[in-house]
Image: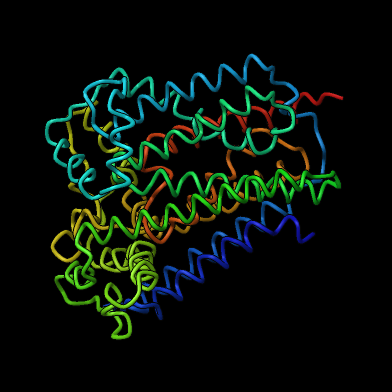
Amino acid sequence: MQMKYLLPIVFVETYLVITLLVFSFGPIEYFLEEPLVFWGYIASYHLAMIMGYILAEVTSKKKINRTVSFDDISSFQIRFLILIAFLAFLIGHKNLTMSASIIPYDFISNIVAGLQNSTAQYVLKIARMDEYAGDKALNILYFFVAFSKLILIPIVVFYWRKLSIIDKLLALIVSFLPVLSGISAGTNKPLFDFVFIYASSILFYFIYAYYSGKKYSFKRVVFFAVIILLFLCLAIWFFGEAMLGRGGDLTYIESTSPLGHIKIDDAYRNADKDSFLSFIYVWLSNYLVQGYYGFSQSLNVDFTSTFGFGNSPFLIRQAQWLTGYDLSQYTYEHKIEAVWGEAQWHSLYAKIANDFHFSGVVVWNFIMGFYLAKVWRSFLDENNLYAKFLLPLFVIMVIFTPANNQVFGFIETLSTFFLMTLLWLVNVYRIRVFPRN
């Protein structure tokens, strides 16, 4: 088994082990009531993913097939995709800022206000929540067009040289617009999504070029690396300023546990006064691994299945809209509200457990490991177009595993993951049944 086929599982395990080390030995101390149960489940989830991945590898045969690639896409289709991505931005911006109109007349002024005082913009957004009903027809349309915003980034990275100057400019601008939405609403998520998707796409571009023996453009790597670095710095700065504005005092983190299970290490207790970088480090650690604590508290309550909807607030809302029945009352997050706020972050494991119990998460991790290996092999061996769109979503899923169900919890990533999965499955299945020379 060649090392190049094992790179994803090595990344997954290395990253998740690091988050567990941060959870155990980082600047925030978390008390576990049932440590043996907690670590037993965590170990089984890691083992299941590794086993699923390895099984997919040992059952795979290296066979390069004719797949859908960029060469099958015309310039007209690329421009149409950019247009759809712009439409998706308009709908997404309306939902994020909870605006009355799909046309963002105050876009520029809100960006300036967000840079000057992100907390004020965030407070304005929250104030609109009770009155904002949304547009169901637009949201249905959004489900089917939101994918365009996310897949536009891998297209820009992988096929930069084949795009015309106009297409490059338009694609860069449209892919960047959601970042401006996040700034205008005082929200961090769009900035980090932008960085993660661009960074992972350029990494995959480099890896494919290296293992396929093709020349890669060093200038392109440097160009996108500079973009990623700049926006990573912007995202971290924006995050730090937002946390200072929303409360700042690190004792707030301790107050999130009514049981007194969360304590700030004495060395970091005055980080907001001593060092801005230390302050950001503590808050990032909090957001990154607090979901593990929520997961540990969920282990203490009984299971009630939410039938495939409970892993995602978005899916719960859709189920309630269709049936009039609120399934959120059966989720672990709701059941442990008294000891860990429902609005706090809860690990992906607890989110999936809402539907399948904590034992069922073992099976889910096995399937995800198996699927990741298959997608990765189709990317390396077949240069599969849909694999290039799916892999950045896997990166986001893994990065936020300790924190929440980031991919399935939001309409943009949820719809993209399932649509690209469907296209990938149809593409690979058709190739294997009807091979083309």
Q: Nearer the viewer, residue 215 or 13?
A: 215
Quarter occupied by the C terminus: top right
Above or below, comparing residue 290 to residue 181 in the picture: below
Q: Position of residue 365 (x, y in %)?
A: 50, 55
Going 79% across and 29% down the picture, which residue do you hit? Answer: 66
Residue 168 found in image quarter = top right
The scheme the figure's colours follow is rainbow
Q: Nearer the viewer, residue 377 or 221?
A: 221
Q: Position of residue 208 (x, y in %)?
A: 75, 46
Above or below, comparing residue 79 to residue 317 in the picture: above
Query: Can residue 68 be spotted in the picture?
Result: no
Q: Nearer the viewer, residue 288 or 384?
A: 288
Q: Nearer the viewer, residue 133 or 103?
A: 103
Query: Can residue 404 be spotted in the picture?
Result: yes
Q: Position of residue 146 (x, y in %)?
A: 44, 28
Residue 177 found in image quarter = top left
Instruction: Give the farthest residue toward the top.
Output: 76
- The reply, left or right, for residue 213 in relation to residue 368 is right
Going 29% across and 45% down the picture, which residue do you hit? Answer: 186
